[in-house]
Amino acid sequence: MPGVDVRTAALLLVTVGDGTSFPSAARLASYAGLAPTTKSSGTSIHGEHAPRGGGNRLLRRAMFLSTFACMNADPASRAYYDKQRAPGNTRAQALLRLARQRISVLFAVLRDGTFHEPQPAASG
């Protein structure tokens, strides 16, 4: 995957293993602390944010660092980030969504036992 160097890949493999202990990408994202949550109180609903107390800190940090690294190296990731920023989301929300999308790709790669093949950026 773009943005994942040898050290980050080793950390991901040690933390996640072969991915069989997670039944879905959503469970892996929740374990990593990348499942966005919504704050709500009564009738007021506030935006999505990363959960503060939960998740594996090392895995979450590795995913965010790889997300930062891929922003300039992978046009598809940059296009996804820009698409998330367009409706008025904050940088943190867009990065959280991109990290969540990348953890879904990581789960699929581990589940299928294949290599990541970058997709071209969608125009439009």
Image (cartoon, rainbow, N blue to C red):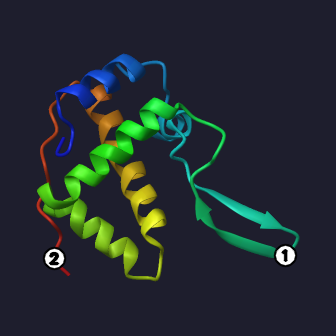
Q: Residue at x 42, y 69 (%)?
A: 91
Q: Position of residue 60 (x, y in %)?
A: 45, 39
- Few, some or many C-alpha atoms within 10 Å of disc 2 (few <14, some 14-19, many ≥20)? few
Q: Position of residue 33 (x, y in %)?
A: 54, 41
Q: Residue at x 23, y 26 (%)?
A: 7
Tell me whether circle 1 and circle 2 mark residues in contact (CB < 8 Å): no
Write down the residue under mark 1.
Answer: 43
Q: Secondary structure at mark 2?
A: loop
- Vertical comparison of 63 with 17: above or below: below
Write down the residue under mark 2.
Answer: 123
Q: Residue at x 42, y 39 (%)?
A: 61
- Few, some or many C-alpha atoms within 10 Å of disc 1 (few <14, some 14-19, many ≥20)? few
Q: Position of residue 97 (x, y in %)?
A: 43, 58
Badge 1 amino acid: Thr
Q: Secondary structure at mark 1?
A: loop
Foreground of the two, 48 or 21: 48
Relative side of 56 to 2, left or right: right
Foreground of the two, 97 or 113: 97
Q: Residue at x 36, y 57 (%)?
A: 98
Badge 2 amino acid: Ser
Of the two numbered discs 1 and 2 on the same chain, state the one appearing first in sequence: 1
Which residue extends farthest right? 42
Q: Image quadrant for the C terminus? A: bottom left
Which disc is residue 116 wearing?
A: none
Relative side of 42 to 65, left or right: right
